[in-house]
Image: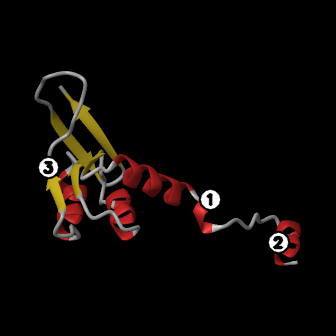
Amino acid sequence: MLEKVAWTAGFHVTRKVNTLRSKRMAVIRRCGLKLVLDVGANVGQWAAEVLGDGFVGTVVSFEPLPEAYAELAKNAAENHICLNIGLGSQDSRRSSLSRKDQSIAVS
């Protein structure tokens, strides 16, 4: 009955085991991962979600923008390593300019 009411209101009710988060954690457990990388971490939303869902290994987060990195590092758990660098497909050094409303990569 609850499902019918929810469906009528435009919602779909599902079991927790059918969520993307629970499926992601099932894959992490099945593969026996002890380390995950969070590339372009921003302020650490993904890392917080994975750790909050029960991941007990290490999360390494990469965030090049200073403002986002400061928030990321401030909220990091004990098993969460934060690096103030960006990752890319080329071996190079780049400066990063940041404004409140946008970010610009400069070579």
Mark 1 lies on a secondary structure that is helix
The label nearer to you, 2 versus 3, is 2
The label nearer to you, 3 versus 1, is 1
Mark 3 lies on a secondary structure that is loop
At horizontal 27% and vertical 64% (from top left) the residue drawn is 56
Per the model, the C-alpha gap separating discs 1 and 2 is 15 Å
Residue 49 quadrant = bottom left
Mark found first going from the N terminus, 1 or 2: 2
Q: Which residue is disc 1 drawn over? A: 18
Of the residues shown, which amino acid type is indicated by label 2? Glu
Residue 45: percent from left, percent from top: 37, 61
Mark found first going from the N terminus, 2 or 3: 2
Nearer-the-camera pick, 102 or 20: 20
Q: Which mark is residue 3?
A: 2
Q: Which residue is disc 3 drawn over? A: 84
Q: Left or right: 21 with respect to 55?
A: right
Q: Residues within 10 Å of mark 1 (few under 14, many from 20)?
A: few
Residue 9 quadrant = bottom right
Mark found first going from the N terminus, 3 or 1: 1
Question: Where's the N terminus, which quadrant?
Answer: bottom right
